[in-house]
């Protein structure tokens, strides 16, 4: 008999499904503290949660029989994934079960804003009849701009097309073929903001996306444009939004998520041209049923068959295989991080070639780590060896693999080739003494780089004074150079330089490096 503890409220359909399964016994105890959870968890094989239960390292250590934690929903911020991995506990979620619900809320807010529905409702309740004051706007033939083109963004696009809207979208990590599939025009971020009649946000909250809509972006929008955020609080600078709405620089906004939840004493409450909902993105009966039933099915399947669906931390290799492949896997992940830092467009095809000693390992493990390097810092969902294949396919990335015993002058070599738009980027890496990673080539440049810390890469015309000029700029801003490597392309007047620096350069300093005569591009990567 497998025992399942349910510590957060799940829909009855999920409970009924569990009760109908042979060999499954459930116990429901919600609102438990960490102390109480530590006391009761040792007797259970599985734990089903939503967002309230905190699955800490202490809880996981106390869970002597626990095999799986199932999160009904997408976010796993309340689960210590590293501790779960250490304890051999699988963590799984339901990333797409409430996508339709969130997309529909964004569309609902679009209608609400276009027809002034909240104000109209209040007006009638107050005994008024303000038809001319509440003049609205049609949805048809307007431009629906989608920032973030994951599962939810794509559903919004489908709904927008059904409403006869022009749909445009921006997501730097999704291949062009995906935009075409959903009949969305792929544009850059500035074009998205400038052309939007309705700008709806569906991207994760990362360091790069925090305040992605701020004073500068709001100033670029049409005066008639409306902003909708049903994704994450923090994507919008709320003070900048207040100023733009208060001064009439955009027509309206709708927020379901906030920098602070609940949003206490927000100045936005003073405005009439903004609509609020209390984080209702997943709050429909259908969504609650969907996530509850889906996580119940996944957990039962795992307990009965060992098959892990939407698992976030499941290793695929034996301990011996992992030990042999781990250094090459680490190298591949680093190369993936370098590649995504050097490339400007979304990658639609990745070729992974392994040579020499690396070819004796499971190539899929190496390829998965390369994909993780490409994707891990770009998405809100944790990306690991279990889910990276599906995520890569969803982002429109195809994978090609090859192996060879000869390593082109090295004992081992891993080569990644990324295809994006009309461009190709190729880079190779090796291991010194089987453990010390080195980047050894980028495109036509043979260059030996220690891939660690902050790296500044430049492409420039090969002529005197360039290195000195860049070094002078860095020194004047107290940026220390820890390492430097320079390579010149054979038969060309082109050079590449890789500089290890003590700190990340701010945007102004990076632009100063780019402005050095003969410098074609400068990019920095933190490893």
Image: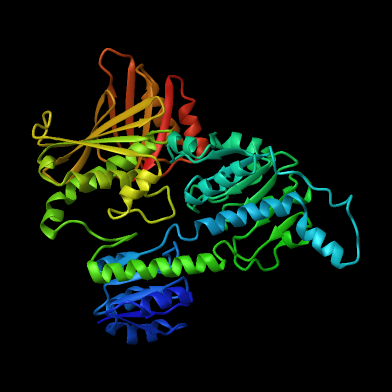
Residue 87: tell me if it is visible.
Answer: no
Q: Position of residue 335 (x, y in %)?
A: 28, 40
Residue 397 percent coordinates (x, y): 35, 39
Q: Residue placed at 15% from the left, 49% from the top?
A: 325
Q: Residue at x 51, y 51 (%)?
A: 152
Q: Quadrant of the N terminus?
A: bottom left
Q: How many marks?
A: 0
Toward which corner of the image does residue 483 lie, by quadrant? top left
Residue 126 image point, x, y percent: 88, 67
Quick check: 234 above or below 510?
below
Q: Position of residue 429 (x, y in %)?
A: 21, 36
User: Taking 239 as reference, is 54 above or below it?
Assistant: below
- Residue placed furthest toward the top: 491
With respect to residue 369, does 287 lie above or below?
A: below
Res. 90 image quadrant? bottom left
Residue 190 visible somewhere in the drawing: yes
Q: Please report the residue visible at 25 percent of the width from the left and 71 percent of the height from the top.
A: 304
Q: How is the image coloured?
A: rainbow
Question: Would you identify the image quadrant in which residue 469 lies?
Answer: top left
Height in image: 56 above or below 452? below
Please name whichever residue, 166 or 148, is drawn nearer the observer in this view of the structure. 166
| Residue 408 as seen in the image, left or right of residue 37 | left
On the picture, is 128 further left or further right than 211?
A: right
Q: Nearer the viewer, residue 159 or 226?
A: 159
**Is 60 in front, or is 312?**
312
């Amino acid at each position: 008999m497998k025992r399942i503890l349910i510590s957060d409220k799940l829909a009855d359909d999920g409970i009924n499904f569990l009760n109908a399964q042979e060999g499954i016994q459930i116990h429901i105890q919600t609102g438990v503290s960490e102390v109480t959870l530590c006391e009761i968890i040792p007797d259970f094989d599985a734990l089903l949660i939503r967002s309230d239960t905190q699955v800490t390292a202490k809880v996981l250590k106390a869970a002597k029989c626990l095999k799986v934690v199932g999160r009904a929903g997408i976010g796993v911020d309340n689960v210590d994934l590293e501790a779960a991995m250490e304890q051999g506990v699988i963590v799984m979620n339901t990333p797409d079960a409430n996508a339709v619900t969130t997309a529909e809320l964004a569309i609902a807010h679009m209608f609400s804003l276009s027809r002034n529905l909240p104000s109209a409702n209040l007006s009638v309740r107050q005994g008024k009849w303000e038809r001319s004051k509440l003049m609205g706007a049609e949805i048809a033939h307007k431009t629906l701009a989608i920032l973030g083109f994951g599962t939810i963004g794509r559903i919004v696009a489908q709904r927008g097309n059904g409403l006869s809207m022009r749909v445009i979208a921006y997501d730097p990590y999704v291949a062009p073929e995906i935009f075409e599939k959903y009949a969305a025009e792929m544009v850059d971020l500035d074009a998205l903001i400038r052309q939007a009649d309705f700008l709806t946000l569906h991207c994760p909250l990362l360091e790069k996306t925090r305040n992605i809509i701020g004073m500068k972006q709001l100033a670029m929008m049409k005066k008639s444009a409306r902003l909708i955020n049903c994704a994450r609080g923090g994507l919008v600078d709320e003070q900048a939004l207040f100023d733009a709405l208060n001064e009439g620089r955009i027509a309206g906004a709708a927020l379901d998520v906030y920098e602070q939840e609940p949003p206490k004493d927000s100045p936005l409450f003073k405005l009439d041209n903004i609509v609020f909902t209390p984080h209702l993105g997943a709050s429909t009966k259908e969504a609650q049923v969907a996530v509850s039933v889906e996580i119940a099915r996944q957990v039962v399947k795992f307990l009965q068959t060992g098959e892990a669906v939407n698992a976030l931390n499941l290793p695929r290799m034996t301990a011996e295989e992992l030990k042999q492949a781990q250094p090459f896997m680490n190298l591949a992940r680093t190369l993936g991080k370098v590649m995504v830092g050097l490339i400007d467009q979304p990658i639609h095809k990745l070729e992974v070639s392994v040579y020499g000693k690396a070819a004796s390992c499971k190539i899929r493990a190496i390829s998965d780590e390369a994909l993780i390097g490409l994707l891990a810092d770009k998405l809100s969902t944790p990306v690991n060896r279990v889910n990276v294949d599906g995520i890569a396919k969803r982002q429109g990335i195809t994978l090609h693999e090859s192996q060879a015993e000869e390593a082109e002058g090295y004992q081992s070599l891993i080569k990644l080739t990324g295809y994006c738009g009309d461009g190709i980027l190729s880079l190779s890496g090796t291991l010194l003494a089987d453990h010390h990673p080195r980047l050894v080539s980028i495109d036509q440049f043979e260059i030996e780089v220690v891939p660690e810390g902050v790296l500044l890469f430049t492409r420039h015309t090969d002529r005197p004074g360039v290195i000195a000029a860049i070094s002078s700029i860095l020194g004047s801003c107290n940026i220390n150079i820890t390492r430097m490597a320079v390579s010149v392309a054979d038969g060309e007047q082109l050079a590449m330089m890789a500089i290890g620096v003590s700190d990340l350069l701010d945007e102004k300093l990076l632009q100063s490096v780019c402005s050095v005569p003969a410098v074609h591009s400068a990019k920095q990567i933190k490893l």
